[in-house]
């Protein structure tokens, strides 16, 4: 396993490394159609 983050921005621990946004949260259009 590489110590660097992959293209998905996931670290070796599988945690998000300073994510630009929260992919787990739905877009504004989903909550406010």
Image (tube, rainbow, N blue to C red):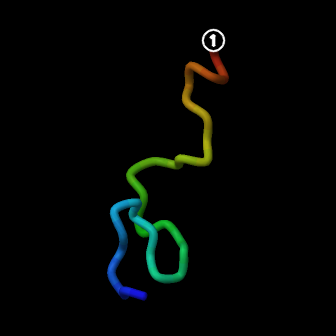
Q: Position of residue 9 (x, y in %)?
A: 39, 64
**The N terminus - image quarter:** bottom left
Vertical arrangement, residue 22 with respect to residue 8, above or below: above
Disc 1: which residue: 33
Seen in the image, is 2 located left or right of residue 22? Answer: left
Q: Of residues 22 and 8, which is closer to you in this image?
A: 8
Vertical arrangement, residue 27 with respect to residue 15, above or below: above
Q: Of residues 10 and 27, which is closer to you in this image?
A: 10
Please name the residue shown 61% across and 35% down the image. Answer: 26
Please name the residue shown 36% across and 69% down the image. Answer: 6
Q: Position of residue 5 (x, y in %)?
A: 36, 74
SS at mark 1 in the image: loop
**The C terminus - image quarter:** top right
Q: Residues within 10 Å of mark 1 (few under 14, many from 20)?
A: few
Q: Of residues 3 and 29, which is closer to you in this image?
A: 3
Q: Position of residue 13 (x, y in %)?
A: 53, 82
Vertical arrangement, residue 12 with respect to residue 19, above or below: below
Q: Tell me how many marks there are.
A: 1
Which residue reaches farthest right?
Answer: 31
Which residue reaches farthest front?
Answer: 1
Which image quadrant is residue 32 in? top right
Which residue reaches farthest top?
Answer: 33
Which image quadrant is residue 29 in? top right
Vertical arrangement, residue 21 with respect to residue 2, above or below: above
Q: Position of residue 21 (x, y in %)?
A: 45, 48
Seen in the image, is 13 located left or right of residue 6? Answer: right
């Amino acid at each position: 396993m590489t110590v660097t983050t992959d293209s998905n921005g996931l670290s070796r621990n599988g945690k998000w490394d300073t994510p630009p946004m929260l992919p787990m949260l739905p877009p504004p259009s989903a909550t406010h159609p």
